Every structure is written in structure tokens, then in C-alpha cells.
Amino acid sequence: MDRISKVKHLSDEELALKVAAGSCSLFEELVSRYSARLFHFLRHRTETDQDIEDMVQETFLKAFRSIDRFNPEWKFSTWLYTIAGRSAISRHRSNKKMKPDPAVASSIPGPEEIVIQKQESQNIWELANQLPEKEYEALWLRYAEDMSIKEIARVTKKKPVSVRVLLYRARLNLAKRIDQSAFSKKLAGTAPAKHKLSFL
Amino acid sequence: MFCTVYKWLISQAADSGKPVSGFVKNHTQRCDSCREFAQLCESLKPKFAQDKHAILKNYDGMLSKRIISALPKEKAPISGRQRISRKSFARRRVLVPSLAAAFLVAAVSVSIIFIAVHRSRDMGPFGHPSELVNAASPEVLLVKAESPLETEYQELKKTLDTTTKFLRSYLDFRIGQQTE
């Protein structure tokens, strides 16, 4: 078995421990596993993709610097998402006074973008993306990262009960959005919506 | 009317991974809204998992490459301070204030003892025994014997004066005079 396939078989926690022990090159595998996931997790936090990419990069740099502090009792994803959340908060604080770029804010989507948006709207994550920031993040951690309520509470610095309430609200709001989406499709005649939840 | 409660229970069941209880099931058979919500909660997990792969697949690996290129090739050598683990740091955080408090208490006690010793030495009526021998007349001895009382009286007078001054300035009134 060559080195790459060996690395692919290692769990996140094993990789993190090896990086902490000095095998810095293995951190690249963690980056490739988590960069896209962190990107989607942080989508709500900023206006532009560039900012999200900067935040993801910042998160990985912080994680790399403090990998010695990683506690293998917890999942690596929990630790990384906690760092990402904190970085996003501190970045938000420092950029609070900055106004969004008017060119970006007023940009009108072109025909290609409209087609992409239509394709994306079929994806349930795009519907979830319309929810408030906290609800989207709770859904991402629950369903994309398969975290327990306790782990989500740790990442979001909330009590487990608050996380349950957040997920409950997210599900209710998502149900409403799906209803609207099914209804608009019915109006447009693009899809037969016999049932309210035909989306699923 | 109680649909909010039922929906909350359905959401709880989805979080815990357990099936909904019998009375919630009975309600969902009668209530369309709750039935749809229960169906949604059941279908969310596979749907989210399926669509997650779709959105991550669309994502290009440019960001990973950018991050990897920005990472330092080697970790910076850990200095002595950074080597201190979290646990020892926490222990230190508890120890430092208690040590400071102990030091403060020790300093206060030493100063109290020091002041008390010096005071008792100063307030001695005759000081060193040789002074008593050298004292010429009984009048001088009498004055010396009375001196502790005199000193105490002077001290009390001073204290009273300063207290009166302080009260006067603080409360803004004059003793023996009517305030306007």
C-alpha cells in the first residue's frame, strides 16, 4: 500500500495526532478533507466568496499552529469547527464598521448564473442557506457533519437545550420554505406538486 | 392547537434518533400539518447527506491548494512558555492569585508585628534602665512616669482633630454653627 492510500485510510484524529507529533505534511490531507466543508459552514458569515475563503484559510492556519492542543477525546471536526466559529466571530468584530462593497451588493446575475441558481435550488442545502445563520449552521453540523447535540453545543457555545430549539426552528422554517418552493414550482408548471413535500 | 407541542416532540425524536411515541403517532394520523412535519424530519437526514455530496463535488480544489501553499512547511519550534500545557496553565492561573494573597497576608502580618514592637519600645516610660539611674530629680522621674498618659492624650487629641476635619469637609457642616 503506497503512502497516499495509507494516509487516506487514517482517521482525522489519527492524522491530527501525527501532525502534532511532527508529520506536518499530513496536515494537507486534513485541509483537503475539510476546506470545502468549512467553506459551506461559513457561508452565512460574510458577503463574498473571497471573504469566506480567507476565513477558511485563517481557520486552518490557527489549527496548524495550535494542533498540539488538540484533545483526541473530542472529534477533530468538533475542534476545527470551534476554531472556525471563533475566527468568524473575531473577524466579524474587526470588520463590523466596514460597509459591504456596493458593486458586489448590486451585482445582477447573468444568464449563466441564473441557470446555476436554478440548478442549485434543487439542492436542499440551498434552501437551508436561506435560513438564518445560526439555524443553517446547526443544520450543517447536525446533518453534514453528523455531530451529536452535545458536540454542536460545544462548537456553537450554546446549551444542548438551545441547540435542540435551534434545530426545531430550523426544521419548521425549512418546512415552510419547501412548501413555498413546491408552491412556486406548481405555479410555474415546472413540476407537479401533488403533495406539499413533493420536493423531498 | 397543540401542534406546536407535537412538532417539538417530533423534532426531539429526530434529534435523539428514537421513534415518536404512541400518542404523537395517533395525532399525526389525524393532523396533516404534523404528519408532513414528521415526514420531513424523517426524510431530512438522507436528503441532506445526498445533497451534501452534490454541493461538495461541485466545489473546486483551488481553495485547498491555496491553503496548503500558505501553510508553513515546518512548525515553529515551541518555546518554553508555549510548551506549558493547558492543564498546567489552568493550575498556574489558580495558583498565582492565591500565592499573591498569601504574600500580601504575610507582608501585612510582618508590618503589624514590626509596628507593635516599635510602639511598645517607644512608649516605654523610662527607655533604657541607665536613663533611670541618670535621672537627676524626682520631678523629672515624675514627668517621665506621666509621659505615657501625656503621649496617649496627645495621640487622642490628634485623632479627634483629624476626624473632626474630615467630617467637616465630608459632610460640609460646621460644629457649633447652623448650616444655611
Image: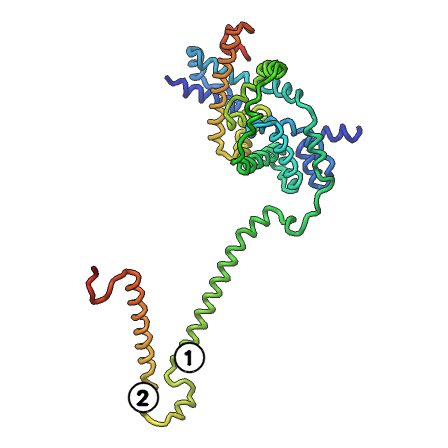
- Residue under numbered circle 2: B142
Q: Residues within 10 Å of mark 2 (few under 14, many from 20)?
A: few
Residue with the most extreme left position:
B178
Residue with the most extreme right position:
A2
Residue at image x 50%, y 25%?
Answer: A132
- Residue under numbered circle 1: B121
Residue A22, how many percent across, how many down? 73, 41
Residue at image x 74%, y 36%?
Answer: A25
Mark 1: amino acid: Arg
Residue B137, how many percent across, how many down? 34, 94
Question: SS class of the residue under badge 2?
Answer: helix
Q: Is residue B158 visible?
A: yes
Q: Is residue A164 left or right of residue A126?
A: left
Question: SS class of the residue under badge 1?
Answer: helix
Quadrant the C terminus of chain A occupies = top right
Q: Which colouring convention does the figure follow?
A: rainbow
In the depicted structure, whether residue B3 falls above or below residue A72: above
- Separation of disc 2 and disc 1 at Cα? 19 Å
Residue with the most extreme bottom position:
B136
Q: Is residue A141 visible?
A: no
Q: Which chain is home to disc 2?
A: B
Mark 2: amino acid: Leu
Q: Is residue B89 left or right of residue A170?
A: right
Front in this rendered view, residue B175 or A6: B175
Total numbered badges shown on the rendered structure:
2
Residue at image x 59%, y 34%?
Answer: A84
